[in-house]
């Protein structure tokens, strides 16, 4: 009996000295394994008499149960110690602010484009769309642009492969081709509705053409106020009695709505564009603020040239209208007080995040 008690006590001490599950399993083998002390004593029972076997067997089983209980207790202690270690290593400070995914937003020029479309949409203007790789006819010829116009120069225009020497393809230099495309389709629908065939100029009744054409344009130019890729928005209103007065009323209303300034003054300054006659540059003047008193150019405009009206398939003796073109990039600079156009295209989140 004393031998079994000493064995149990030795097992408890060795289990207590085990600091890892592997060390504990090695200690267990010395007492409960195939060659362990308890197993050897159970094997020795075979040499005893039945009466002694019964007494000795009960004592050995009692010692075995005590060792197994000590083993399970040490296993639980080691498991708890490992859990506490993991909790310490992976502890979270719940008082720290949570991590949030960054919130995106529209680019400032996109905000301006949406604002332009909304304002002109309230005046009954549709929004046209068209390809950025354009043909020579839509980009130049249909807009009464002679062959020696500066925009045709290789130094000012990005030409692309395809087409021919007489009809090359290029990245559009303005969004006016979208106006021509829209007008041509508009006139085709009017012809079909009126049952008029042929290729002659159309002089019959049709709904007015009232459209804006916003989008990207491309020219070989780059400095603080110019970019090789920039945005443009052009407008067109064609009808039977659309005058320069309508142009002044429409564009004045737009500028005052865009800048939210009723005290905004506009000036129409005589100029020249091959696709309008007469033509005018449009300047604005703020009555207050950092730009107060200065005249700032924001757009070009004029009555649509008869040759351009003919390119649309309309008879200029019956249809007349006005067109304008402005730079949303410049309008964005004026609205938000940005002094370098390149900031819009650098992709610097410190700058762009201000417009979220």
Image: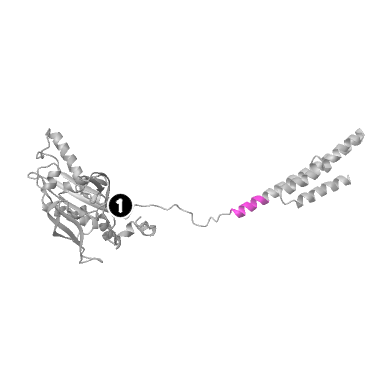
Left or right, residue 162 beside residue 12: left
* Rendered position, 193 above or below 295: above
Quarter occupied by residue 291: bottom left
Q: How many marks?
A: 1
Residue 75 or 209: which is nearer the viewer? Answer: 209
Residue 293: x and y, percent? 20, 67
Left or right, residue 148 beside residue 19: left
Residue 21: x and y, percent? 71, 47
Residue 135: x and y, percent? 23, 45
Residue 221: x and y, percent? 27, 58
Q: Quadrant of the N terminus?
A: top right
Q: Residue furthest left?
A: 317
Q: Which residues are magenta?
A: 81-90
Residue 252 or 1: which is nearer the viewer? Answer: 252
85 part of magenta stretch: yes
Q: Residue furthest right?
A: 49
Q: Please tell me whether mark 1 sits on a helix, a strand or a loop.
A: helix
Left or right, residue 175 beside residue 317: right
Q: Which residue is mark 1?
A: 110
Q: Quadrant of the C terminus?
A: bottom left
Query: Does any portion of residue 124 appear in the rendered image?
Result: no
Left or right, residue 172 beside residue 34: left
């Amino acid at each position: 009996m004393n031998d079994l008690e000493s064995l149990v006590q030795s097992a408890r001490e060795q289990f207590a000295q085990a600091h890892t599950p592997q060390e504990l399993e090695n200690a267990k083998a010395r007492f409960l394994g195939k060659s362990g002390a308890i197993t050897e004593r159970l094997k020795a029972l075979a040499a005893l008499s039945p009466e002694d076997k019964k007494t000795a067997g009960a004592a050995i089983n009692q010692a075995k149960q005590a060792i197994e209980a000590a083993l399970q207790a040490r296993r639980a202690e080691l498991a708890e110690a490992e859990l506490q270690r993991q909790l310490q290593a992976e502890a979270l400070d719940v008082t720290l602010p949570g991590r949030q995914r960054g919130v995106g937003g529209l680019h400032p020029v996109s905000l301006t484009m949406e604002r332009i479309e909304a304002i002109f949409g309230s005046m009954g203007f549709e929004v046209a769309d068209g390809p950025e790789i354009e043909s020579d006819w839509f980009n130049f010829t249909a807009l009464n642009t002679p062959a020696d116009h500066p925009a045709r120069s290789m130094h000012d225009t990005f030409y692309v492969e395809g087409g021919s020497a007489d009809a090359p393809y290029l990245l559009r230099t303005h969004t006016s081709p979208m106006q021509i495309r829209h007008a041509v389709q508009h006139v085709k629908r009017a012809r079909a509705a009126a049952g008029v065939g042929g290729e002659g100029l159309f002089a019959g009744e049709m709904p007015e053409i009232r459209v804006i054409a916003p989008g990207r344009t491309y020219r070989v130019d780059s400095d603080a106020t110019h970019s090789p890729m920039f945005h443009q928005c052009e407008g067109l209103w064609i009808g039977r009695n659309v005058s320069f007065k309508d142009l002044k009323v429409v564009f004045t209303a737009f500028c005052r709505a865009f800048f939210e300034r009723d005290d905004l003054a506009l000036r129409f300054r005589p100029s020249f564009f091959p696709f309008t006659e007469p033509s005018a540059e449009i300047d604005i003047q703020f009555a207050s603020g950092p730009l107060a008193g200065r005249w700032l150019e924001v757009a070009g405009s004029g009555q649509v040239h008869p040759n351009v009206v003919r390119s649309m398939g309309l008879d200029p003796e019956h249809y007349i209208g006005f067109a304008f073109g402005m730079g949303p990039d410049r309008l964005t600079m004026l609205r938000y007080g940005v002094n370098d156009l390149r900031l819009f295209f650098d992709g610097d989140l410190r700058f762009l995040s201000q417009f979220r």
